[in-house]
Amino acid sequence: MNTLDIQALRLRLPGTARPVLDGVDLTVGARETVALVGESGSGKSLTSRSVLGLLPPGASARGTVRVVGDDVLAMSPGQLRVLRTGTAAMIFQDPRAAVNPMRRVGDFLTESLRLNARMRKEAAEERAVRMLEAVGLTAAALRAYPGQLSGGMLQRVVIAAALMGDPALILADEPTTALDVTTQAEVVALLGELRESFGTGLLFVTHDLGLAAAISDRVYVMYAGRIVETGPADELFARPRHPYTAALLDSTPRLDAPRGRLAAIEGRPPSLREELAGCPFAARCLYATDVCTRQAPALLPLADGPARLASCHHGDLVKENHR
Amino acid sequence: MRKTVLEAAGLHRSYGSVRAVDDVSFRLSEGGSLGIVGESGSGKTTTARIVVGLEHADSGRVVIHGRDRGDRRRGRAERLARAREVQMVFQDPFLSLDPRTTVGGALRETLRLHFPGADHGRRITELLDQVGLGARESDALPRQLSGGQRQRVAIARALAVEPAVLVLDEAVAALDVSVQAQILNLLGEIRAETGIGYLFITHDLGVVRCVTDEVIVMRHGRIVESGPTARVLAAPEHPYTRLLLESVPRPGWDPRRIAEARRAL
Amino acid sequence: MTAATLLRRPGLARIRTSRAPLSLLCLGFVALVVALAVLAPWIAPYDANTVDLGNALAGPSAEHLLGVDASGRDTLSRLVLGARTSLLGPLGVVVFSTLAGVAIGTAAAWRGGWLDSVLSRGAELVFAFPGMLLAILIVSVHGEGLLAPVIALAIAYLPYVSRLTRSLVLAERERPYVEAYRVQGHSGLQICLRHVVPGVAPVVLAQSTINFGYALIDLAGLSFLGLGVPALTPDWGRMVFDGKTAVQYGYPLSAIVPCAAIVLTVVAFNVVGERWADKVSRRDG
């Protein structure tokens, strides 16, 4: 059984012409690290938040979101609370915004266990110390206020808090974007170690394709609420089959690519206020033809290898032309 | 060798016991592009703010076209002359524009201040065209524009003053990758057309490689390495520069080794 | 941006509504009162000071819809004409206190340092001194007339506006766009007048609307004490004072009607001001 299994998730917001999430399929296996890559507005954060049943007000969701077999979309508020404090935990982008600056780190770590799991104070603190040690901090951090810790240390605290309920799945929403590059490496290394020692699945949401390729087993690329391509990280990075993935790779200023003009993607993603008949990327795509504006391509398996899927009418052209 | 447009010599700035900027010197040649890289707390932003005049240096000089910016005479003419030496594009395009002023209004305001009596309507069209915006955006309020469009407006507004040097403080950090590439390309075009000098503050080595000729690497307020961008990135001499380069994620990347190297440094 | 909260009086702060129909009703009432005041000379059926002693203390009739007071004057006419004085006074208070308060608050926040200390301490000193007492003091020195109490109350209300403006401008000047204008070469005064003050204006005007209600009560109170408005000028506070003996004789109407007018107007202004402030904070939030 997959730790996370999202099937045909469709999310509609009031006042929009098309769904913000349009048939998302995504799985995370046990001990697997999966990256979900997309730009702002692609729906990547909405997808990860829907795993905890955190839907925007007025949203209507269809499809299934199973965490260790249980459908989140059908859960009662009580079951959702159990899910959020135990089975699945989320790490947010900005650790400073996720922690109450007026409370000590110890209170922050033990609060949810004591309130929701009715754990005794001593037991909760004992666990908090264990988790702080697991993320490379000491018991002394319990007494500290968030303001006394650096950004990197605070993100460790947030990760420790996520581990408190012994989750099967960790959702990390841009957990390193607010951090320096060298600190990012530390946090990523830590997440990798924790996955091995605790056996959790990890869904890593990021806008950084390079980071996604570096740390994950599999990658999903999202555009305008749809998964446009997925596959093993190194393959997808080396041989993209969707024009958007290819363009995203080309427009990233990299250290190993030739200097000079970047291949920018002109235009902007489709607005939520307009309906989409065909492929959402067609208007910005170099390969687009008539069929692309008429008919939305399905996410189909590729011959390149197992678990390789892309939704493009001209995937073969991309394969030939990219590098 | 090309003429020097901007020279900073021996800049110091302390906040209490923290030395935010500690003996920083560099020069930018006319039409050149100099990158300052570093992590948070490296002093790169404070250095930029000293150059622009939003902070004062405790000691040291900033000279542009042979004129010392530390010379703090007051008055309107002085203020305008200083503005024409250096302009700045800020990190967050959502906050650096007045939410109540339209794009055209913001440009007109600047043009009126610096070039009274000229044909502002034509110049506004010209400036917007230069950054890839049209008449439709001219009437828009900032909140009706995307992040990339707002950053284009901020660039147009800085160019309106016709400065000798443009300071870009993490100007593409808040943008999506595809939009970031558009803006980086745009900045390259503008430099080629106008011969303006760039001082590019960033934490992103990929961006540095893309838009700068020379680079200085800062750490804890000090310059640890400087030189031509291609040389520094290809053959870094300082261990900190090497660490920064290795920290950039790529396939086959080993974050654990970087974490160890960081602790060792 | 509305980290700065409006200054309110304890009791009146609770008079607010999030329900749209009620706040619309209040807005309508404010409009009605203002229209009455503007059009008073054409609407009032009688001259405010025509005395008809034979008819004194008569109840409502077809000729006198709201009855007649102890001196035989038509209550409706006095109420309508009184709206002018009763609204003009608070208007003067609000205009003066807003202009001066915004200027002082902006200057204090923008320049900071010693100027901030002097202006803020000065405003606090005025704030600590009861406004009514200040008004009574000035009126007793200056003598009768509307001008003296208006100036006195304007000074008393000034700190409400200047403190609010100061905190708003402090938040606004920290915004990066202000720095961007500085780099562009705009002077501090230009940035303040063109961008910062218009930015904080909606919140300040909401405060001033609420102040209008408070000033109305205070001025009516002064009139009731016989301070300020000359004896024959129609004014709601004065009408309550004139009617109080009639109440003792069992004819309450000529006192109750202006009382109700005062209360309703104050409540209406308060609700409108609070609603406005809520809207502004939601827009900025």
Image: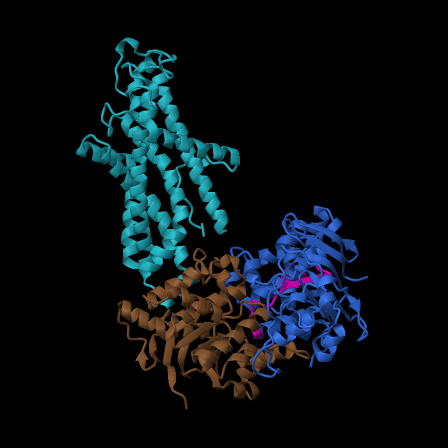
- Rendering coords of residue A267 (x, y %): 59, 67
Total tally of numbered discs in the picture: 0
In the image, residue C39 lies in the stretch drawn in magenta: no
| Quadrant housing the N terminus of chain A | bottom right
- Rendering coords of residue A218 (x, y %): 73, 70
Q: Quadrant of residue C265?
A: top left
Q: Residue at x 50, y 60 (%)?
A: B136
Q: Is residue C86 left or right of residue A166?
A: left
Chain A representation colour: blue
**Residue toward you, B62 or C74:** C74
Q: Residue at x 52, y 79 (%)?
A: B211
The magenta-colored residue range is A159-181
Chain B representation colour: brown
In the image, residue A171 lies in the stretch drawn in magenta: yes
**Residue toward you, C115 or A155:** C115
**Residue toward you, B219 or A66:** A66
Chain that appears cyan: C
Report whether residue C213 is seen: yes
Report whether residue A129 is seen: no
| Quadrant housing the C terminus of chain A | bottom right
**Residue toward you, C141 or C32:** C32
- Rendering coords of residue A235 (x, y %): 74, 76
Q: How is the image coloured?
A: by chain
